[in-house]
Amino acid sequence: MDRVLAWAGFLGAWLLVAGPLYQGALELSEEDVDREGMQASIAQLARPEPPSPWWWLLPPVMYLIRRRRNNAFLQAALARLTPAQREQRASFINKAGGWFTVALGAALLAAEQTWGVVSRQRWPAWLFWLLIVVMLAAAVLNTALRMNREPRAAGADPAPAAEDA
């Protein structure tokens, strides 16, 4: 019975990873975001110059220089957006962050359940890592395939019916 419950916990935990990934993708695809308008506004800005490659000799300094330049670019880009576009962006980022957090928490629980199955079955430790990679890939693939298969509610055109001869 212990093995059955270990496998049930393993599968349940991985379903808890796949669910938020798919639900998050669905909700984010339904978000009303003016992507074209945002891209047009930002396209007029000059991208930040990359720091000299010599700064890689001091990686923390390179990181700080790049971060400061990217933050300045982000502030300039946000200043060019309309208030509605800034609100859309904030809503999108908040929703994406929430679903990512739920999926990450579920992945941590799934890792624990995966380790439980591997240790109960007395499998080698490398199999734990293989299972993690395979199950994460399966969760992401599930989302990708389902998102490409299902028509979107907003603006979806059904495929034209074939005419009978």
Image (cartoon, helix red, strand yellow):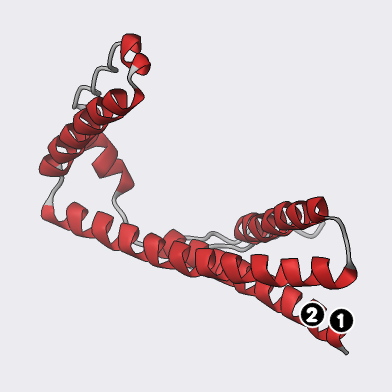
Give the quarter of the image for residue 132. bottom right
Indicate the quadrant containing the C terminus: top left, top right, bottom left or bottom right.
bottom right
Residue type at mark 1 is Arg
Q: Is residue 154 visible in the rendered structure shown here?
A: no
What SS does tag 2 mark?
helix
Query: Up-down: is 164 above or below 82?
Result: below
Indicate the quadrant containing the N terminus: top left, top right, bottom left or bottom right.
bottom right
Q: Which residue lies most toward the bottom here?
A: 1
Q: Which residue is mark 1?
A: 3
Q: Is residue 154 left or right of residue 122?
A: left
Residue 36, given in percent of the width and then of the height, sits at 31, 42
Q: Is residue 82 visible in the rendered structure shown here?
A: yes
Labelled disc at residue 114: none
Query: Up-down: is 63 above or below 125?
Result: above
Residue 12, given in percent of the width and then of the height, sits at 70, 78
Spatial separation of the CA atoms under disc 1 and disc 2: 5 Å
What SS does tag 1 mark?
helix
**Nearer-the-camera pick, 131 or 83:** 131
Residue drawn at 63 percent across, 54 percent down: 144
Residue 20, given in percent of the width and then of the height, sits at 54, 70
Residue type at mark 2 is Ala
Q: Which residue is mark 2?
A: 6
Pointers 1 and 2 in contact (CB under 8 A)? yes
